[in-house]
Amino acid sequence: MRSLSASELLNVWEWGLNQPSWSKAIKLLASACPETSIDMLTKFSLGQRDAMLLTLREWTFGSQLVSQVTCPSCGEVLELNFDIADMRVASLSLEPVEKYCLELGDYQVSFRLPNSLDMIAIAEHKQPEIAQEILLERCILQAVCNGEYLLFQQLPSHARDAIITQMAQADPQANVPIDISCSACNHQWQSLFDIVSFFWAEINAWRFRVLREVHTLAAAYSWREADILAMSPRRRQLYLEMVTD
């Protein structure tokens, strides 16, 4: 994996307009990992995918993360500042794990971790309960009880819950909770950190700034967009300061 140039990042942003979240994530990684096939990228677990995106985000915008949230209790807008290291709960590993095994009493279940292909499969299902059931059924490879093979529908709820718990333990980067406390009313709650939407929001804000810089310098010097984007941010800023003097 490598970092993206300004031109590459703009191309990804333009391509990703009106695309679903999973598609934006894969496009970012495909651009940063030209040596890795799309097929392999879509089969990485969600935790592996998000760990890669976290690293790419650090290379792109640095290690500090700044976000705003609204307190659900009093409506106060809070600014959150944290480091990428705080969000990195698992080491980056690109080695695929084919399956996991769980023994629960008389039940033996083998399963794999959810990936981007599963997100595609459940994208149109608006009811979380149905989407979760479809996702779980896709990820269970085999279920046996007392030597008899079971259909997914034959698995009892406690077995399904145990599988979901083990999935979360095996792929912690897929669900990273943030503990938040409101400074105004002391309300405390927990929110999940979504690197895909967070990174994309930053890219969207960045492209507005950089395209405005391109417009200013192109109008002043008649330079091509490609040449302006090829400059380092510091050099672009120096030229912008001279234009506005």
Image (tube, helix red, strand yellow):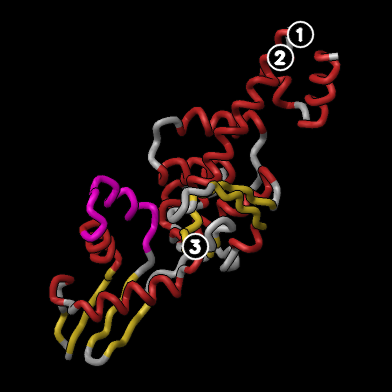
- Does dot 3 land on a helix, a strand or a loop? loop
Task: Determine whether label 1 and label 2 are within 8 Å by CB.
Answer: yes
Numbered disc in front, either 2 or 3? 3
**99 left or right of 161?**
right
Numbered disc in front, either 1 or 3? 3
What is the spatial separation of the Cα atoms under label 1 and label 3, in whole angstroms?
Answer: 51 Å
Disc sitting over residue 41 in the figure:
none
What is the spatial separation of the Cα atoms under label 2 and label 3, in whole angstroms?
Answer: 45 Å
The residue depicted at 48 percent of the width and 45 percent of the height is 197
Residue 125 highlighted magenta (yes or no): yes
Q: Quadrant of residue 124?
A: top left
Task: Determine whether label 1 and label 3 are within 8 Å by CB.
Answer: no
Kindly identify which residue carries mark 3.
187
Q: Is residue 69 above or below residue 44?
A: above
Where residue 47 sits in the image (x, y, percent)?
48, 62
At label 3, the amino acid type is His
Disc sitting over residue 216 in the figure:
2
Q: Is residue 207 above or below residue 31?
A: above
At label 1, the amino acid type is Ala
Residue 94 visible? The answer is: no
**57 left or right of 96?**
right
Where residue 232 sits in the image (x, y, percent)?
78, 31
Where residue 65 sits in the image (x, y, percent)?
64, 50
Residue 7 highlighted magenta (yes or no): no
The residue depicted at 46 percent of the width and 33 percent of the height is 16
Disc sitting over residue 220 in the figure:
1
Magenta segment boundaries in residue numbering = 114-129
